Amino acid sequence: MKYFEKILIANRCEIAIRIMRACRELDIDTVAIYSDADKDSLFVHYADEAFPVGPSPPSKSYLNKERIISVAKRAGAEAIHPGYGFLAENAEFARLCEEEGITFIGPKSKTIAAMGSKIQSKLTMKKAGVPVLSGTDGGIDDINEAAKVADSIGYPVIVKASAGGGGIGMHIVHDPSEIELAIEGAMRIAESAFGDRTVFIEKYLEKPRHVEVQIFCDEHKNRVHMFERECSIQRRHQKLIEEAPCPVMTPELREKMTDSALRVAETAGYVNAGTVEFLYDNGEHYFMEMNTRLQVEHTITELVTGIDIVKEQIMVASGEPLQYAQEDISLRGHAIECRINAEDPMNNFSSDPGKITRYRSPGGPGIRLDSGIHAGFAIPPFYDSMIAKLCAWGMSREYAIARMKRAIYEYVILGVKTTLPLHHAIMHNPEFISGNTHTHFLQEEHISRTLKRYIQEEETRMTQLATPLRADKKVAAITAGLVAVIEQNRKD
């Protein structure tokens, strides 16, 4: 059965290729869009068709809603998959698709809008009986009122942008003297980043775990969960390592957390893939937010359940019922994902765009690599710094860690700094190996103390393994020849 004839992927790099792979297996033609910076990228050549959408800055290309819709209509695409980031959780873009008769592969625009407000979604879930952290029930802009709320909750508290994401606009406040600056700073950043200066306050947990539940719903009121993921290892509130399942999960806690997640989905009238995020501390879980899109870390859920989430997204978007009932979904083994970013861990994770001079990808049993990079690829400075997702699967967590260590050892990326040395350090860290992680894990001294040594080890190793990988004219000619073949096949 063919669910759509043609799908436009409103994204770039590795996630664009990931979605195209699912489409290819479903015999669906794909349309890529690309900015000036991406015109020679692998995902552009992988697609069946590709169209330019504007200059390199995202605001003029990947965030240009009207132009993307225009390309979809010109190409005859019946559906758009937004991937994650960019327009994936943009309610206006989903609404434009609906008005133009183009299927948006994700939830309805009204659902995205409702769950996009952290204040409204938290209030809705509180009324539905889902556990939430104590805090304000609405937005706040009065400093005196904010101080009273913080005093009643008890310090520390956290100030958040209601329309925010990725840690943008968050301010942790430990003392009443800091609350005024925190409110003003959060509002200023929120207005600049999201066009909405609304902020709220809630209780701040010092060392919680970040645990999320993958849910999936169809238009026929079928709802399932695909278990949980541990996402506690983060930098600047953005994830670096994820695991499935959570190392400290018990059957009782899983039942409570997945029940809460499904209640969130039911309350929101949710359709398609979504993720409900919780904070977990001292035996209790608290609703944080719902991501109304495909997650970066969907890969590890696919590894432990055997379900192709992107294919399921496409089928459900076409009106088909879910292919799985809850009793059909089971956990098998353990999976870990390391996000490989073009960043310098020793320099506050500053991005390091540039040209990859030598490259060798890892492989072998239990290894999955999602990427769109190669030797000679120039990482542009305009987009998120994540360049690849390295996943390892094993029948146990210990086995998965061993495979990840081996995969990191095999991975060669030269020309730019990456987070590979940090992942190398974490995989050898006794606290991580024991499963003792939390959202401030990377701020602890036991990581920074050994990081410099691991960076030196990684640089030496990669240089040795890269010796036979000569980025000479012969390699460049072969690459150019392959691209030419792909282009000719596309035309034929």
Image: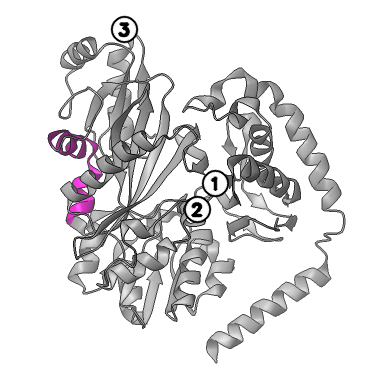
Amino acid under disc 2: Val
Left or right of 456? Residue 298 is left
Kindly tell me whether residue 35 is visible in this rendering: no
Amino acid under disc 3: Ser
**What secondary structure is marked by label 2?**
helix
Q: Report which quarter residue 139 is drawn in.
A: top left
Sequence-wise first label, 3 or 1: 3
Question: Looking at the rendered structure, which numbered label has been put on residue 196?
Answer: none
The residue pinned by badge 1 equals 334
Above or below 302: residue 53? below
- Give 130 or 88, whichever is nearer the viewer: 130
Give x and y (percent) for residue 310. Answer: 41, 64
The residue pinned by badge 3 equals 177
Compute the Cα span from label 2 to label 1: 6 Å
The majority secondary structure of the magenta stretch comes to helix
Left or right of 264? Residue 402 is right
Compute the Cα span from label 2 to label 3: 47 Å
Question: Looking at the rendered structure, which numbered label has been put on residue 304?
Answer: 2
Amino acid under disc 1: His
Give x and y (percent) for residue 174. Answer: 36, 12
Sequence-wise first label, 2 or 3: 3
Q: Which portion, as a residue range, is magenta?
A: 110-127
Residues under numbered marks 2 and 1 in contact, where contact means CB atoms less than 8 Å apart: yes
Above or below 357: residue 397? above
Above or below 174: residue 352? below
- Marks 3, 1: nearer the viewer: 1
Give x and y (percent) for residue 411. Answer: 72, 51
